[in-house]
Image: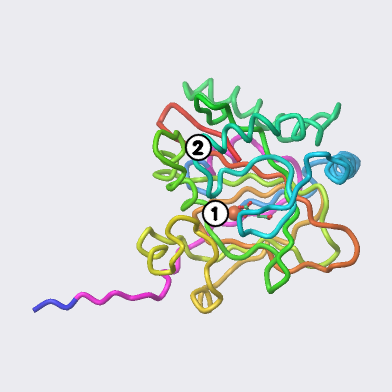
């Protein structure tokens, strides 16, 4: 008789993490899309002046709201997390003026990267576009300040479960078969904390089911992650981070006085060999 043992201990997956100063290259984004990079931290990728202007535009943005989906934070823009595609794409359309107001007349670093990536992928016969449906299309990014008050200001999670469960008749679940890349720009960072912590673990659907986070990928418990090694990206304002969102990651507690931690975030990934989608 064969006994099958089901272990609940998380499998340790090796991580490939790179840190450097400068500007992000399109080659690196493509490597991340192919799953060759777990984390890339680019220091001083955009100017402090631009970072301050975007932060000021966030603080005075009329579209600034508290999140009401169980993840503590304030945001501008739309998140597909726990929404059906009709609600997400309709919201993305309705909040677009607020997302545009984050950049006003500035040279938007997120759009600049999108445009450059689009040109480069086109040369390889690959289309890059924002995810869409009959109800609208995704925005270029969303802006968020996490406000969790425990060990983490954003609890450990993965970005794949929400993509897998983005709904029927939606373009996004196909991306979950490939690498879901999270692309983050940091216009404001506190003096202490607010690190992006990446654990050496890429949960499977079975792992998620056993942890009770099958549809959300959020949050993984401290007990589950206890023995898993991790790496912290120590971010500063003006930095960019690119990660394989399939690995568990979270944001460490930050100092409460001083500057807030503000993030511009979007996701991208191959839906088909000749199509890369971008969404928030
Ligand atoms: O704030 C960060 O550095 C990470 C954000 C994140 O993981 C997410 O938006 O899913
Ligand atoms: Fe995430």
Q: Quadrant of ligand 1?
A: bottom right
Q: Give the range drawn in magenta.
A: 4-32
Tell me if mark 2 has few (under 14), some (14-19) or many (20+) residues whose alpha carbon lies within 10 angstroms of its own.
Answer: many
State yes or no: residue 29 in magenta.
Answer: yes
Q: Nearer the viewer, residue 190 or 242?
A: 190
Q: Name the residue under label 2.
A: 85
Q: Is residue 58 above or below residue 157?
A: above
Q: In which quarter of the image is the N terminus?
A: bottom left
Kindly identify which residue carries mark 1: 38
The x, y position of residue 235, in whole percent, is: 75, 57
Q: Which residue is drawn at 33% across and 76% down?
A: 7
Q: Name which residue lies at 50% across and 37% down.
A: 85
183 sits to left or right of 181: right
- In whole angstroms, how far apart are the C-alphas of marks 2 and 1? 28 Å
87 with respect to 270 (left or right): right
Q: Which residue is rendered at x = 70% and y = 67% of the image?
A: 252
Rendered image quadrant of residue 114 = top right
Does the magenta-highlighted stretch encompass residue 25?
yes
- The residue carrying pointer 1 sits among few (fewer than 14), some (14 to 19) or many (20 or more) residues within 10 Å by Cα, namely many
SS assignment at label 2: helix
Image position, residue 225 (x, y; %):
52, 74
Mark positioned earlier in the residue sequence (2 or 1): 1
- Whether disc 1's CB lies below 8 Å from ligand 2 is answered no
């Amino acid at each position: 008789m064969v006994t099958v043992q089901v272990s609940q201990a998380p499998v340790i997956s090796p991580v490939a993490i790179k840190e450097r100063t400068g500007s992000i290259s399109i080659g690196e984004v493509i490597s991340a899309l192919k799953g060759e990079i777990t984390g890339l931290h680019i220091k001083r990728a955009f100017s402090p002046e631009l970072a301050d202007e975007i932060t000021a535009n966030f603080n005075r943005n009329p579209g600034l709201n508290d999140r009401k989906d169980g993840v503590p934070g304030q945001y501008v823009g739309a998140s597909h997390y726990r929404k059906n595609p009709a609600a997400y794409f309709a919201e993305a359309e309705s909040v677009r003026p607020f997302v545009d107001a984050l950049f006003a007349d500035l040279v938007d670093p997120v759009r600049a990267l999108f445009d450059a990536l689009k040109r480069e992928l086109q040369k390889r016969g690959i289309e890059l576009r924002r995810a869409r449906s009959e109800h609208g299309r995704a925005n270029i990014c969303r802006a968020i300040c996490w406000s969790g008050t425990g060990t983490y200001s954003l609890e450990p999670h993965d970005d794949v479960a929400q993509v897998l469960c983005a709904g029927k008749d939606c373009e996004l679940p196909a991306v979950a078969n490939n690498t879901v890349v999270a692309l983050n720009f940091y216009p404001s960072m506190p003096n202490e904390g607010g690190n992006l912590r990446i654990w050496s673990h890429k949960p499977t659907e079975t792992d998620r089911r056993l942890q009770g986070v099958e549809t959300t990928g959020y949050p993984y418990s401290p007990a589950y992650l206890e023995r898993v090694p991790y790496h912290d990206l120590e971010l500063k304002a003006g930095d960019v981070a690119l990660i394989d969102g399939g690995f568990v990651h979270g944001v460490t507690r930050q100092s409460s006085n001083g500057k807030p931690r503000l993030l511009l975030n979007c996701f991208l990934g191959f839906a088909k060999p000749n199509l890369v989608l971008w969404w928030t």
